[in-house]
Amino acid sequence: MKSIRYALRIFSLACFVAISQQALAINIFTCEPEWHALATEIAGSEANVYVATSANQDPHHVQARPSLISAVRRADLVFCTGGGLESGWLPVLLSKGSNPKVQRAPGLLLAAEQVALLEKPVLLDRAEGDIHASGNPHVHLDPRRILIIAEKLKDRLIEIDAKDANGYQKRFDAFHQRWQKNIQHWEQQAAPLRNTPVIVHHRSWSYLLDWLGIRQVGELEPKPGIPPTPAHLASLISTTQTEHAQLILFTRYNGDKAAKWLTQRSDACAVELPFTVGGDDDSASLDELFSRLIDALVTTQTNCKKSGAHD
Amino acid sequence: MRTQYFVLGAAVAVSAFSYSEKTSAMESVADFNPAMSVIFDGLYYHDNVDGEGPDIIEEHNSALHSHGGHDHEHGELERGFNLRETELVLSGSVDPYFDAWLTASLSSEGIELEEAWFRSNSLPAGLQLKGGKFLSGFGYHNEKHTHSWDFIDQNLAYSSLLGDHGLSGTGLQMTWLAPTEHFWQAGLEVLQGSELERFGTQLDAADIADEIAAEFDPNGTGEFSEEELNLGIPSGPKLGVAFLRFGPDIGTEHALQLGLSAAHHNAMQSFHEEGTDAFVSEGAAHIYSAQAVFKGFAKSAFGKGSYSVQGEYMHFTSDQTATFHTNPAETGLPLALKQDAAYAQATYGFAPRWQVGVRSSAAGFNGSLREGNDSEDIQTSRQHSLALTWDATEFSRLRLQFNHNDIAIEDDNGNAGREKFNQVMLQYNLSLGAHGAHTF
């Protein structure tokens, strides 16, 4: 009898510890690694930040696997790109997650809805490929937009979890300061890239190019979301010549086949870039990601010019 | 009839709405509510048994085989070109408390309502309530819509126990999702259970009575009333389903889901003809099922390197009583039915946008039909399938499938036999409209 009472006491204590631990820390569900990094930055290391995808997965094509549903069930905040990027899986997570808190604001924060979007389509027709109705959703590659999103995230965290408001504000202020310096530094570093004509695999780099004043003159995909075809690639040979394209940008999950094919038939050089935090060994944080992107672009441009002059 | 008008009305309303939205404010189309899509599905079919393939499979030796049940009103496959169901899907939020979904199947014969349900999204504690007409959460494959199948046709195990369209019905479903790191979901359903194709099938008593009068004339008067069949008054709810699913978090590149389900029907009916005799029986029926699904996700785009493996095992039993027998001495005799069915399948993305799938299904094993002291074994039917799929985009797909069938049949004299034959199908499947999100 005594042992049963003892066991019960231990059990209730364990339950209490488990529940109170869960209740103390805020649970944030993020869809992509860049938002995982930003949420960790603003919410601090005590927050439980869950990320749904890894850096080298294409966020357009992710399955609503059971563990994601469970993670949404426990979330206080769902923080994703939005703008249609996750339309194949996020709606399932939200509807199956049985969590009324995250169905809409403040529990649901979509980055693409917080900033102005590029490439808003004039004609909404699927014959034009996988076009997102509200515009290009890949907003995380513009650090100025990241800053706006970080501020919105801070506001949401304070709204959801007011007791920790000071912490969120403090961490955001520190990030804000550091990030503005970073932007200045990166812009200086990337100055030689201004007006450089480039070809991209998919329209994933539009915000980076827009920020740095790089000119996009072609896409390896014939239409967004349609893999490169031989006929389309062949047509790009003349584009690279007439537009003097110097760089071809792609990320790991695009595969290097199409980019390599075109570099062999033109003066342009292919450069593999991390698409998000964790995309390669040198981009473990948001700061490192942008440093790495700019470094890779500048270095490839410099080396490419040299070898070009060599010919 | 009323449903048809409702569906038509809804479709017209939505298309008018979409038109005005498009012309006035282009950017708001992203937030379009309700989302609408039309699924086009057609195929070219061929077999080496003079087009009898679908009939042979339908009539395979099974403990659930009965004459005079509710047949689903879809056209059978013919050799040559076939237009399958064209589906109209509407879904969206009703208000902050409910989502709703409608699937109507359109054909030249009319409109049929396949699904029409609402689901709560504001209940606390991980609870969700779904109501209306919906696909049951039984098993794994059962809830999948035809256009998200990995093969063109239904697997033989499901066809045998649940019917080509699976287990669905009108009623309520309650699910509970545990607040745990790993996925634990439990669900309970109470369904009317009166429109089932195989498991839990209900007889059309008037038709059966006419057939008995014409062929057996037990009263010697040429007349026979349906009351003489002594079937229970068909009222519901008659079907209960329970399921439990578990999916551990094993990282971003793999996913596993295990499940157990049970279905109970309290008044399954069947009609049997045996030479000069015929009888009608009724009683409770059960299916127990275990499922496992494992998927690996590719790091490259367009599915190259992605794979999936899934399997389900089902065990069916039913204890019925002959409520009417043309030989009056045998009325009241107990009838025990049982059989198992299972399938396993695997898919692999061998190139961007290309997928190959293999599937093996079997039905009828461990099966028997025991009537009083007489027992008859059910023979096992098997099907092996190979499918090659090309996804042009997320919205269009072509699929080529080959089936080798080894089907146990019974001829008109009750003699067991086997039919071995092949089937080839080439299918297109297009989705026009909203970007559909797919469940795991």
Image (cartoon, coloured by chain):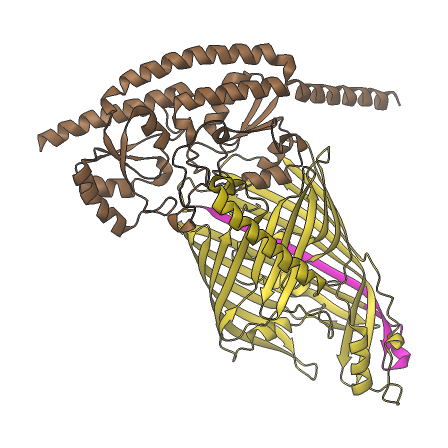
Chain colours: A brown, B yellow
Queried whether the magenta region covers residue B323, the answer comes back as: yes
The reply, left or right, for residue A258 in relation to residue B235 is: left
Residue B104: percent from left, percent from top: 62, 59
Residue at image x 59%, y 64%? Answer: B106
User: Is A33 rendered above or below residue B359?
Assistant: above
The reply, left or right, for residue B1 in relation to residue B268 is: left
The reply, left or right, for residue B373 in relation to residue A79 is: right
Question: Which residues make up the magenta segment?
Answer: B306-335
* Quarter residue A270 falls in: top left
**In this orientation, which residue lies closer to the viewer: B335 or B199?**
B199
Residue at image x 37%, y 20%? Answer: A288
The reply, left or right, for residue B89 in relation to residue B283 is: left
* Image quarter of the C terminus of chain B: top right
Residue B339: percent from left, percent from top: 70, 64
Number of on-image labels: 0
User: Is A189 rendered above or below residue B306?
Assistant: above
Queried whether the magenta region covers residue A23, the answer comes back as: no
Residue B54: percent from left, percent from top: 58, 72
User: Is A28 rendered above or below residue A239?
Assistant: above
Residue at image x 85%, y 78%? Answer: B325
* Image quarter of the N terminus of chain B: bottom right
Residue A134: percent from left, percent from top: 46, 37
**In this orientation, which residue lies closer to the viewer: A29 or A70?**
A29
Residue at image x 85%, y 21%? Answer: A5
The answer to whether residue A87 is visible is no
Residue extending farthest left = A311
